Structure formats: C-alpha cells, structure tokens
C-alpha cells in the first residue's frame, strides 16, 4: 500500500514512467505475437520438410517454383526401387489462379499464396510428421474421390465462402467441395487439394507449351500404326515423339518416404549419386537446419527491435527511482534510524520499481492485445491473421515487465541502502 | 536481561574534516552514564556537541575513539550493517521535527517500528493500538501526519519510540517545534512514562525542559562541563 501511495505522490511522474514501460511492453507484445505466428507457420513448414525427402525437377527453384521441367513417372518408379525407400508420392503444384495482368505481383500477402495441390491418392501422404490433416468438415481427398472432388484449406474456404457441398470454379472448371480443413496456421490453409490427375490437367492447360504438346499427342493418337508406317522417317519420328507425351509425367515435385530404421540421409545421398542429372534433392536434415537458421535470424530481428524499446523504458524507471530516492532521503534516514536495515531499504525500493514496471506492463500488454485483436479481426474474414495470441506468452510478458522493473530498481535501491543515516538525518 | 546501566560512554571523541587542513572537533572526550529509569537531560549552548553526542549514542554515527556500551553490549566498533539491529530493539528515537513517514497513517507509523523490531504482524498491531491509546490518540489511528497537529504528531512519535520496548529513548529537542502549552503536555507525558519505568535521555536547550528532568548533564565545547 505504501508503494502505491508513494507512486500517487508524484502522479505525473509515475504516469510518464508507466507510459515509458508500457510503450516498450506494447512493442514486445505485438512483435512477440507476430513472431509466434511466424514461428508457428515456420514450424509447420519445418515439420513438413523434415518428414520427407523432397525432390523437384533439375533446374527448378524450390522457393519460387519457377523454371525446371517435370518428373516423369518412369523416373519416380526407379526411385521407388531404391533400397530403404518406402514410397514415392508424385505431386503437382500450381497457383490457384493466374495473376491479374494489371497487378502481376498480386499485392502483399502473408504466408503461402493460394495453391492447387494435386497428389496421388493411391500413394497417399508419405510424410512422417504429417500423416493426417484434421478436417473441420467433410473429408480429405482419397482414392475413392471423384476427379472433380476437392478439399480446401480454411483460408480458401473463408475467402470464397465455401462449405461442403458447394461448387468452386478453378481455372474455368467446376469442382465439388467435399472437405474443409481445420486451421493449421501454415501452408495447407491456402491450399486446394485435388486428385493428381485433375491437377495435371489444369497444369497442362495453364502451360501453353505443354498444352500444345498434349494437343499434338491427342492428334497423334488418332493416327493408326498403319498410317504411321506410311509416313516419311522425319514425319514418323515427329508423330512418335508426340505420342510419347504422357500426362502422368507432369509432376512438379515428389515426396519420398523412408522405411523404419533407415537413415534418410543415406537415401538422399543415393538419389544425388544416381539421379543428379534429373532431380534436385532436399535433405530433411539440411532443410531443418536451414529453417532453424532463418527462424533464429527472424526472431532475433523481431525481438531485438522490441527489446530496444524496452531498454528505453528501463532507463526511464532508473531515472524515476533515482529522483524518487533523492526526494525521499529524509524518509530513508528516518526508517534507518528506527531500525530498518540497508537490505530492507534496498528491497523496498527494488520492489517499488518492479510494481511501477508491472503497471506499465499491464497497460502495454492490454494495449497490445487490443491492437492485435483489431488487426486480426480485420484479417479474419480471409483467415489470414498475422498475430498469434497465446495466454502463456502474455503472462510471460507481464512477468517480464516486473522483472525488468526489479533489474532497473537494483542500482538506485543499492544507493538508497548505502545512505549514511546521519547524513540522511541531517536533511531532517 | 536488561543491564542496570543502559548507556555507558567513556572518552567519546568525534571530529569532522571540513577541508584539508581544517577539522571541527565536535566531541573531545565525553563521558556519560545513563541508568535504568533515568530521566536525564543533556544541555549546552549551540555547537557544544549535543546533537553529535546524541547521534553517536543512538548509533547513527560512529565515534572516532572511546568506549560505548548500550544495555551492556560493547558497540564501540559496531559495523553499520549490525547497528540497525541495536537501533531497532534497544533504542527509541524522538526527533525535534517528529519525522513521521508522510504516506503512512499514524497507526502505520507506529506499526512500522514493530516491523523493524522483528515483531509478528498481529503483535505489531496489538501493541501499536495499545500505545496509541496510551498517548491519547485512539481516535486518530487512520490520520496521516499532515492531518495531525504538532503535538499529536509528537505523541505518535513517542508511541513509535516505545514500540519495541527499548532500553533507552533518545529525544532530540522533543519540544523544539511545539508551543509552550503543547511542550508541557509532551514533557508531562514523558515524565509519566518515566514513572512507569522508561529510561529517557533528552537533548535540549530549553531550561524548562531540562529542569523537568531528574538529572542534567552539561556539555561545553565538546566536553563534560565540570
């Protein structure tokens, strides 16, 4: 109670000090919640990437998905025969829609863009860390799904107001929504899952070169063997090449699983040795390390900025306490004269600093939560909240503010404890 | 067990260095003995060393030389970090300017002394209430010092000084900021407490106050006046 009364004695000064800390804590709360969200997304990505060996066509850029070719099914069958490989699941990935020609970058977005994920329902999910995806309603695509069945991520469902039973037009074709995924806070929220055959068709349609190859293949299929044999050698070669186009070869990436007891890095090395001219191999271990490094750098930047703001607040507490002790030298003298020890004086002032900081922490945290709630509320309609509020983090922030105050108060409190009684009393 | 001689000081000296070649010799070998139940006054002209002596006897300052015993314990060379224990339990203070903590109520000021004296909270409150009653301020428990008159504040200070049942109560000009009527009331209260067995050593320049005491110790130029 005495502490609160002492704070009330200098209301304006106390207010300014509390505000100093609250700004720092506000920054810490907001930046911390942003980091939590990003870490959750990254954790999801890391969980995925470390649960499988990912292969993509030589020449492709894994991060942008640009360049490169496709992975033929024969190649994937060879990979399946490598000792230790449990399964190979081909996949097709392409943007849900082509960008607006007037806005080719598509503006800014948080997280993966809306993406079509075609996967082989026969092979299933080979990822060790992600064996199932929780469904909010309906069911995931499986081997019994029809060609036009899709399961959508929560962000896709919110943005397009989709539920099970609805139809959704994708690249000019109508699809049936059979499932809506639960929120994952990472990639799948913006994915549309469909059988690989459907995705392969969309991929070919979207790619003029592949589309022309398919058209030629379709035309070549109408020519009989007898007619082909009557053609010139060059024409025959062209027809045979056209006929060799297979839509099942249109795979933009593949997941490679490993058997229990097998070291995935050995399989990675085998893939690199045997197929170095055909594929890029992403090792789960290496991916995990790279993601951890990037995550650490991101967290350092985010929290570093917030801690700088807190340091400013900390100095304001030190200043306030030094001024307060200077004004209360007489009181300190009285207390020591009637039997207070130096350590009890130090404890009193340290605790007072902690209480001031705690007050600032509560205000800052409260304001931070308010801002986050407003911003997330605005983004909720698209499921793209950019902050993650966690109760234990918020409690931690408040406790941290108290600790910061204690640390700030130590030096002034030690000065107070060392005041010589007779000198303090001379101020009486 | 309480010693018969509550304060024994022999050959106490104290100097203050004002500059490199200039020192002020505040005390030049003072001897004082206070027995249990004494009601003594230290008088002397301004600058004779009264307050310096009071600070040393109260362990608020250290002598340069000499022997000092408080309630039978040698405190001549006591360290600052241990002096507070003696101050809390053996010595009560009454100051000229009352020196109550302004943010605490009258009751809380008295209870605070009990906290430093190591009393349990329930005991502190019980004792503080009894003392406030004794000094006639049972109806002013929750008043802040700014809401009390000078005389009332000094009575709270007296209650505070008595909280830990000290061996001796040191009063430095206890009536210095009071009018004559209130001064008499305070001295009467101290005399009454002395009659109940409390030991007082009062520093004063007021002869009326000194004459109310049973024994007078005179100081002149930092020494006992013979």
Image: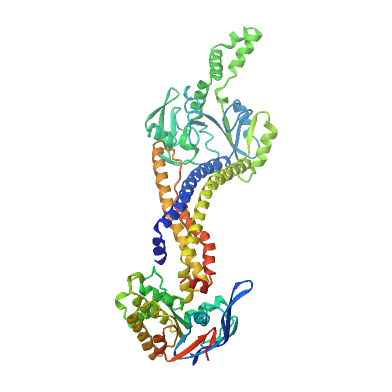
In the image shown, does A160 or A80 lie closer to the viewer?
Answer: A160
Q: Toward which corner of the image does residue A273 lie, by quadrant?
A: top right
Q: Is residue A268 visible?
A: yes
Q: Is residue A319 above or below residue A175?
A: below
Q: Quadrant of residue B93?
A: bottom left
Q: Residue A95's spot in the image, x, y percent?
A: 50, 28
How has the structure been colored for display?
rainbow
* Residue occupying image coordinates x 41% and y 51%: A366
| A123 left or right, relative to A375 | right
Give residue A391's position: percent from left, percent from top: 44, 52
Task: Pick whichever, B216 or A198, lies toward us.
Answer: B216
- Residue B52 in picture, x, y percent from top left: 52, 79
Residue located at (56% from left, 13% from top): A220
Give above or below for A200 relative to A260.
above
Q: Name the one closer to the observer, A129 or A258.
A: A129
Whether residue B58 is situated above or below residue A223 in the rendered picture: below
Horizontal and vertical percent for residue A86? 60, 39
Q: How many marks?
A: 0
Q: Is residue B125 visible in this depiction of the protein?
A: no
- Residue at the limit of the structure toward the left, as seen here: B139
Q: Is residue B103 left or right of residue A354?
A: left
């Amino acid at each position: 109670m005495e502490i609160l009364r002492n704070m009330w004695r200098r209301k304006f000064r106390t207010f300014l000090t509390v505000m100093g800390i609250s700004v720092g804590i506000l920054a810490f709360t907001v930046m911390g919640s942003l980091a939590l969200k990003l870490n959750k997304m990254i954790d999801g990505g890391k969980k995925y990437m470390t649960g499988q060996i990912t292969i993509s066509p030589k020449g492709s850029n894994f991060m942008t998905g640009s360049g490169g070719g496709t992975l033929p099914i024969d190649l994937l069958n060879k990979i399946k025969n490598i000792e230790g490989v449990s399964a190979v699941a081909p996949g097709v990935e392409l943007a849900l829609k082509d960008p607006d020609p007037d806005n080719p970058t598509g503006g800014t977005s948080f997280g993966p863009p809306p993406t079509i994920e075609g996967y082989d329902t026969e092979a299933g999910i080979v990822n060790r860390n992600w064996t199932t995806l929780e469904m909010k309603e309906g069911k995931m695509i499986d081997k019994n799904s029809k060609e036009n069945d899709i399961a959508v991520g929560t962000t896709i469902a919110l943005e397009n107001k989709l539920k099970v039973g609805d139809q959704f037009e994708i690249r000019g074709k109508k699809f049936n929504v059979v499932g809506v995924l639960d929120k994952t806070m990472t990639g799948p929220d913006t994915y549309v899952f469909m059988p690989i055959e459907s995705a392969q068709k969309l991929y070919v349609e979207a790619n003029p070169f592949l589309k022309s190859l398919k058209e030629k293949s379709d035309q070549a299929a109408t020519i009989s063997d007898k007619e082909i044999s009557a053609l010139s050698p060059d024409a025959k070669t062209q027809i045979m090449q056209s006929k060799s186009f297979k839509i099942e070869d249109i795979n933009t990436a593949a997941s490679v699983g490993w058997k229990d007891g097998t070291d995935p890095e050995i399989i990675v090395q085998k893939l690199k040795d045997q197929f170095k001219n055909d594929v890029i191999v992403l090792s789960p271990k290496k991916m995990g390390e790279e993601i951890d490094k990037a995550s650490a750098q991101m967290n350092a930047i985010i929290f570093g900025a917030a801690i700088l703001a807190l340091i400013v607040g900390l100095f304001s507490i030190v200043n306030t306490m030094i001024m307060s002790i200077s004004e209360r030298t007489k009181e300190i003298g009285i207390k020591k004269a009637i039997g207070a020890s130096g350590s009890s004086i130090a404890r009193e002032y340290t605790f007072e600093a902690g209480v001031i900081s705690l007050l600032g922490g509560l205000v800052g945290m409260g304001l931070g939560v308010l801002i986050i709630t407003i911003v997330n509320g605005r983004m909720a309609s698209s499921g793209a909240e950019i902050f993650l509020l966690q109760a234990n983090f918020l409690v931690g922030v408040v406790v941290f503010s108290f600790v910061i105050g204690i640390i700030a108060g130590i030096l002034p409190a030690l000065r107070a404890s060392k005041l010589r009684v007779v000198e303090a009393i001379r101020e009486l | 067990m309480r010693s018969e001689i509550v304060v024994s000081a022999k050959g106490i000296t104290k100097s203050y260095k004002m500059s490199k070649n200039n020192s002020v010799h505040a005390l030049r070998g003072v001897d004082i003995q206070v027995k249990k139940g004494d009601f003594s006054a230290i008088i002397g002209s301004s600058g004779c060393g009264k307050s310096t002596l009071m600070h040393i006897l109260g362990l608020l300052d250290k002598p340069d030389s000499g022997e000092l015993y408080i309630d039978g314990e040698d405190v001549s060379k006591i360290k600052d970090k241990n002096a507070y224990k003696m101050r809390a339990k053996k010595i009560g203070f009454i100051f000229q300017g009352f020196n109550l903590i302004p943010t605490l109520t009258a009751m809380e000021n008295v209870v605070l002394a009990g906290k430093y004296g190591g009393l349990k909270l329930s005991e502190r409150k019980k004792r503080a209430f009894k003392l406030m009653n004794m000094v006639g301020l049972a109806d002013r428990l929750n008043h802040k010092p700014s809401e009390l008159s000078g005389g009332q504040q000094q009575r709270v200070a007296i209650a505070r000084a008595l909280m830990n049942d000290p061996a001796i109560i040191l009063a430095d000009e206890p009536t210095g900021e009071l009018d004559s009527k209130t001064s008499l009331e305070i001295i009467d209260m101290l005399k009454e407490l002395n009659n109940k067995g409390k030991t007082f050593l009062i520093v004063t320049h007021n002869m009326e106050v000194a004459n109310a005491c049973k024994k007078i110790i005179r100081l002149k130029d930092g020494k006992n006046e013979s």
